[in-house]
Amino acid sequence: MSAALKTTGEIGRSPPRIEARLKVTGEARYSSDMAVERPAYAYLKTSSIALGHITAMRLDAARAVPGVLDIMTHEGDAAGLKEVRTFMMGGQSGTSMYPMRSNEIRHDGEIVAVVLAETFEAAREAAHLIEVEYDEKAPSATFDSPGAKTVGPGFLKQALTPGDPKVGDAEGAFASAPVKVEASYATPTQHHNAIELYTTTCVWADDKLTVYEPTQFVYGTRAAVATELGLSNTDVHVVSPFIGGGFGGKGTYTTRTGPIALAAKQLGRPVKLVATRDQGFTIATYRAETRHNIRLGATPDGKLTSLIHEGFEVTSRPDGYKVSGVETTSRMYACPNVLTRVSTVHADRSTPGFMRAPPEVPYMFALESAMDELAEKLGLDPVELRRINDTQHENIKGLPFSSRSLMQCYDEAARAFGWSSRDPKPRAMRDGDWLVGYGCATATYPTNIGPAAIRLHLDAQGHATVASAVHDLGQGAYTMLAQLAADGLGLATGDVAVALGDTDLPPGPIAGGSNTTASVSVAIAEACENVRQLLAKAAVKATDTPLSGLDPKQIRLEDGALKGPGNQVESLVVALSRFGEDGITVRADSGPDGTPPLGTTILSKGIPVMVQGMSLKDRVQFAFGAEFVEVRVHARTGEIRVPRITGAFAAGRIVNPRTAHSQLMGGMIWGISSALHEATEIDRRSSRFLNTDLAEYHVPVNADVPSVEVIFVPEEDTKVNPLGIKGLGELGNVGTNAAVANAFYHATGRRIRDLPIRIEDVL
Ligand code: MOS
């Protein structure tokens, strides 16, 4: 890894998004917008049962619809498609249950047929005319359902993280603790519901396949498609320049893509699928419901002596997906005795997967609620309880945090929020008919980082293009890459063009785990340093320049020029003239601390590579924040409002305060949503999701979030990476649900331990 580079100023500015104009004018092409010649349209037919077998399919009426071209079922060639290993097993897939390989149905909404037609309308009409007969079995739906099977911590081979951290004697310490909290918490099923639906467009040319599909990992999608169709990776091109929201749902491969690719091949023309909103609830992953048993022991002055966190997560019958947020909660506060245990509960369900801070949102809800309960038992201010248990070393191995500014976040956010005006007694604050409550909680997210490859081109006029197969989900990746390259080259952000989201570009990290900026910044810095060296070495050898004979190490790129130590200046265009018409092209492959050698080669094969913030040998890396919420509950109607929320965050160096502000604000809004709005309801008899549309799956709108205040706490971290950048994509979303629940308790005197909080909880 190269040494830290001097930065010349573009980092930390807030240029407008370089792709903003494309987006607001509709020029930005999302995957289903790609113009393809004479496409056929696909429409999925999905199962209306969760468990059993198909005994008959009647297709005649569907086939008779004018414009219908073909109908794929398990009785056709789809059964010959290969299956892709799950993410947990080293592959890319979100599930091991591949549909239409046989007549078996293993979860609600499994794909049973794909109708292909001249128009979307014809395909849809035909799909609705397909009659499927099932031999239905009684499915297990969720926790406490007959037949749901709990698998304890032994089942680790598919775990996301090594699992179940512990230290000391937590059971003993809890038994003898003078002050105790023991409580159980629960979080609901949630679905991503990005505005962009799950779409796939496949085009063949000369036995080469192009897939336009919104994905958080183009190289992963490429490898998965190649596996499923028995192609080599290089025969597949995946294009995903803009993604209309991912939230984790587009991070793993879904089973829809293979059949669409096969259909396009068989029809000899492009095929376009836009799955419907309700199908998105069952053909992709989601956040599973969780349960938690927490036990906290403390001394009378508030020092934690024992932390026991037991988690239960629902998953599918065959797949061991779990998020194991105890990796974070076990390290959150100083405590000598920690015990954790995570079990999966296997039911007849589609396999869950990553969603918006997958481990931290449910697990920190439990811990941060329990901390609030403990503060009350101790008669301590909840902020002071965090201060008493703040630490610069994690509990499990005693490793230092690379940096940890948690209490600075608490202090700044508390001041801005006006926490000191809080009357600590529940139900003590009232405004007319409104019960008013203040609550707070900790936000945290590990600083994950991985390898990345960058191609950097500087043309003869001094304009740069930076290219890498990273992904823009709306978070501002285009602008951030431009800024980082501009910073390294001494240019303005506007002088840099950016290409991303395409397997024709060098491999970049999966857009997951909030790792894009922290990872890619390292490769960009290296590429810029390579360019600087090339320019400087050529300049000092030349005789026609004030830089002649200088030490190339002392030459810096600044303001569109090369500058020497004594203010010798040569313009970049003149320096570039030594390289001919094509300018300079370099490629840099970065492999930060803890990543395997040849990390970008592994990435290019579609295997994600990322070191988690808690998996390094000599330190742990997390970003932190503190969130304060005002909740108002109407004493007569039970209406619950969040008029304002304030969060302060420390996440190392901020590349673009504007886009970072938007990400944190968006995260906090999702956090309010996770406390009060979002939940997918499951019919316990049929194991089917019920509210599979945006009318009944509630997400917050503007009226639900009147005031969201985001504060940046400056933080220098010299260890996370050479530029001191931590990720913050998922940070704002963590702890908010607990802050809302804690404020709700303060307003009403009712502790809600099962999310979301509903009007029934008031009445
Ligand atoms: Mo994010 S849920 O890690 O895509």
Image (cartoon, rainbow, N blue to C red):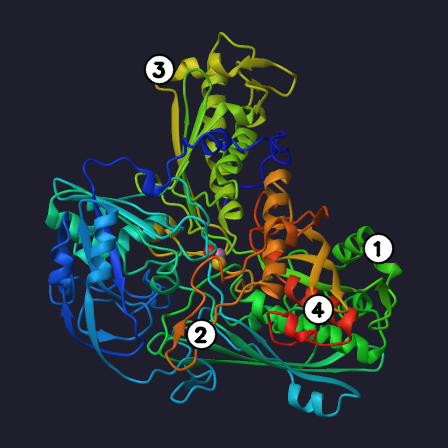
Label 1: state its secondary structure. loop
Q: Is ligand 1 within 8 Å of the beta carbon of the residue shown at mark 1? A: no
Q: Name the residue under label 2.
A: 682
Q: Where is residue 710 in the image (x, y as percent from the top left)?
A: 70, 48
Q: Mark 4 points at which residue?
A: 638
Let me know if residue 621 appears in the view. Answer: no
Tell me if residue 291 comes above or below residue 99 in the rendering: below
Q: Position of residue 746 (x, y in %)?
A: 78, 70
Q: Is residue 321 left or right of residue 363?
A: left
Q: Mark 3 points at which residue?
A: 581
Q: Nearer the viewer, residue 710 or 179?
A: 710
Q: Tell me which amino acid carries mark 4.
A: Gly
Mark 2, mark 4: which one is toward the viewer?
4
Q: Do the residues labelled 2 and 4 touch (CB within 8 Å)?
A: no
Q: Nearer the viewer, residue 430 or 490?
A: 430
Q: Which of 390 and 100 is in front in this view?
A: 100
